[in-house]
Image (cartoon, rainbow, N blue to C red):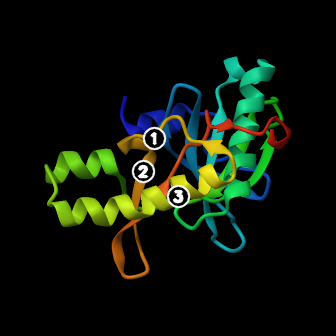
Amino acid sequence: MSQQETDATDPLIGQLVGSYSVVRKLGEGGMGDVYEVVHPGIGKRLALKVLHAEYASRSEIVKRFRAEALAVNQIGHPNIVDILDFSALPDGRPYLLMEYLEGESLAVYLRRTGPLPVADVAELLAPICSAVGAAHDHGITHRDLKPENIQLVPRLNNPRYVKVLDFGIAKLADAGAS
């Protein structure tokens, strides 16, 4: 099914979530879907991550979904995607509102470019290691670090600014933190 066909049949497209209008689906994963949303009054773009309906009634999964927002906000690192809100749709499905990131995943980038020179590898690894190190300093282990969860975005005169995504299954070492 094409993106247009998917968008035409997706009941969230065109709906308001909080103050944001759902524009299009950006992707889907095993636990949820990600959409582009736009504030109609000011044009601010964000990403909306919605838990699949079959998981919304499973308290342990909802706790992990909420833990993603908690983990990211505890860390507060510039190379980790910023999560701005955690709430639920009228049908009960929880969602996260996150910064919208242009660009491509490291996985897509590597498929497109092939093997990288050592200097490029070091340039990409430095912010990844900084983000993961900051998470560890807060007692948080990512547990799903892979090229698909690294986004390269054009920012600050850097076409490959690194953002680490998807702390959804992060482990909070301190039980009190969760």
- Give the label on residue 131, or none: 3
Q: Residue at x 73, y 55 (%)?
A: 74
Query: Three-letter amino acid code at disc 1?
Result: Leu
Q: Is residue 5 left or right of residue 169?
A: left
> In x, y percent, where is residue 123?
30, 66
Q: Give the distance between the C-alpha atoms of the residues marked 1 and 3, in whole angstroms.
A: 11 Å
Q: Identify whether 135 is placed above or below 2.
A: below
Query: Three-letter amino acid code at disc 2?
Result: Ile
Q: Is residue 155 left or right of residue 34?
A: left
Q: Residue at x 20, y 45 (%)?
A: 111
Q: Give the distance between the C-alpha atoms of the residues marked 3 and 2, in whole angstroms.
A: 11 Å
Q: Residue at x 78, y 47 (%)?
A: 86
Quadrant housing residue 68: top right
For marks 1 and 3 on the same chain, the one whose residue lies earlier in the sequence: 3
Q: Which residue is mark 2?
A: 150
Query: Three-letter amino acid code at disc 3?
Result: Ala
Query: Mark 2 near mark 1, Cβ–Cβ under 8 Å?
Result: yes
Question: Where is the N terminus found, in terms of image quarters?
Answer: top left
- Give the label on residue 145, or none: 1
Q: Nearer the viewer, mark 2 or mark 1?
A: 1
> In x, y percent, where is residue 84?
72, 58
For marks 2 and 1 on the same chain, the one whose residue lies earlier in the sequence: 1
> In x, y percent, where is residue 62?
76, 29
Q: Secondary structure at mark 2?
A: strand
Q: Residues within 10 Å of mark 1 (few under 14, many from 20)?
A: some
